[in-house]
Image (cartoon, rainbow, N blue to C red):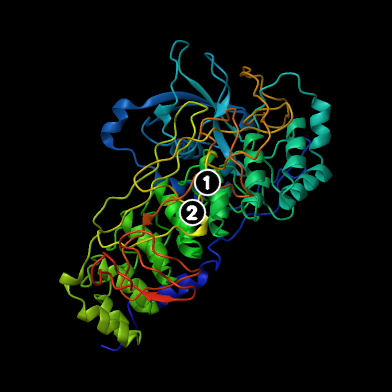
Amino acid sequence: MTHSPATSEDEERHSASECPEGGSESDSSPDGPGRGPRGTRGRGSGAPGSLASIRGLQGRSMSVPDDAHFSMMVFRIGIPDLHQTKCLRFNPDATIWTAKQQVLCALSESLQDVLNYGLFQPATSGRDANFLEEERLLREYPQSFEKGVPYLEFRYKTRVYKQTNLDEKQLAKLHTKTGLKKFLEYVQLGTSDKVARLLDKGLDPNYHDSDSGETPLTLAAQTEGSVEVIRTLCLGGAHIDFRARDGMTALHKAACARHCLALTALLDLGGSPNYKDRRGLTPLFHTAMVGGDPRCCELLLYNRAQLGIADENGWQEIHQACQRGHSQHLEHLLFYGAEPGAQNASGNTALHICALYNKETCARILLYRGANKDVKNNNGQTPFQVAVIAGNFELGELIRNHREQDVVPFQESPKYAARRRGPPGAGLTVPPALLRANSDTSMALPDWMVFAAPGTSSAGAPGPTSGPQGQSQPSAPSTKLSSGTLRSASSPRGARARSPSRGRHPEEAKRQPRGRPSSSGTPREGPAGGTGGSGGPGGSLGSRGRRRKLYSAVPGRSFMAVKSYQAQAEGEISLSKGEKIKGTGAWLGCGRGMGS
């Protein structure tokens, strides 16, 4: 038959509709009414504020089994902006994100910028007031039933001040339009000392720029060399899940900007790799679209990013990586369990996408890792037929001639980061090296994996492959703001008021000694005292690096030596700068004394 490839028009139309940098298109309206004395607290009434869009997201992310109703938890939910109180049942095994959408669907009136509303737990029973983290389970927050039904508030996310002696007039002066603009300039310039000074005076960093719609944290996530500013903002009250006007969090922005160090800092400060944007997409989905540094993809997967997230057309991360030819991202996705046979709304698998867009390298990886070449799409076409119809005859022959005995599955299981729910002060360990297959070749660590100097603590591993093989480094102490008096994480306010929360006072945080804080030493639960190791803007690792195994080479993949290397151990090879090496997927000769 000579008709066009299966739904190729739909696929091409989908491709054209995607933002070239992987960002979501913004359809929010201009700024809504100001919030308190802050004129730039814009809350658009577009997609993020639409109950219809929220209900659409809820249908994809919220499913309650029939037997779950026996273990449902009942809460009183106060909504200060609407002066309402509702009594709702929640599944304790669902995430706070799911519970939040359930609240939104129960509202009789619409709210603006609803994605930046959160469930707030007032101070009670010796616990500080705080906003519940969106990607944690509801049952992870213990509730007391001594005083009746537990109470939570559904309110706009703002900074939670831990002090009671705040000057309201001083706060109002800080939040003028000019003051907020100046604060954004400091963030963009990377002057963390000036940022910390304003935060110590009480400035709330959770706001939108009136022009760009960015928040200070999302702006910092897209700026080079901004790890110190990111850390300062988060320790000064910025919510990591506070979204810009286009619905993206700072993790989404860092993934789209291909900033691995910023992504590492946000994750180490307690951010979740599974935050959703207004389309329900995660940072992993965006990094599969934009490509760039494959360490971003590996880092998110190592930190337990959820796989199989699909957009409105059924495209998953694996489809996006194949359409754009991001072969290393595809390899990481497959190693961490992405389903190669997943089909989009048109019935096309990742191999169909490779055949349609002539992505030979990705097709080789899929076949090499066991993808089924006989799956048919909704038009009854196999990947081979799609390749022929699209005019990609060489790729079609490659698919047709592939044999099952050519498949080489992964021999090891992926390793994941430990769940970071420890007490404050418990540092994070450097991730262990990831092993792929027994035929791996050992090579020296590149510059970004080499530890800085012996005796210094861990500070800012740029990716999950920076630790010694099979071992973890000693935990790095966490850090705090280096100056000032405020040590708050966030602070709630009412519908139109700026009065700070009168929550309980935690122990006053200590000042940080001299030295830059560690980008991987801040625990999820909150800051704790300590110093990081010495290092540059992105941090550095603290001891001499060791060799690690790279994942198995896909046949046909070529590598270029960026500097000369002299073999130092059995099984290594000596390389000259500029020398080109082609991977075969298997050993040639013997490892002992191998010189080529």
Q: Is residue 239 left or right of residue 570?
A: right
Tell me which corner region of the image, top left, top right, bottom left or bottom right, holds residue 319.
Answer: bottom left
Q: Which quarter of the image is occupied by the N terminus?
A: bottom left
- The secondary element bearing badge 2 is classed as helix
Mark 2 or mark 1: whose residue is earlier in sequence: 2
Q: Is residue 108 left or right of residue 594?
A: right
Residue 272 on image: x %, y % = 48, 43
Residue 35 is at least partly visible in this image: no
Tell me which corner region of the image, top left, top right, bottom left or bottom right, holds residue 64.
Answer: top left
Q: Amino acid at mark 1?
A: Leu
Residue 427 on image: x %, y % = 49, 33
Q: Which quarter of the image is occupied by the C terminus?
A: bottom left
Is residue 349 depicted above or below 233 in this figure? below
Q: Which mark is residue 541?
A: 1
Q: Amino acid at mark 2?
A: Met
Q: CA distance from mark 2 to mark 1?
A: 8 Å
Residue at x 80%, y 46% (from the top left corner): 182
Residue at mark 2: 449
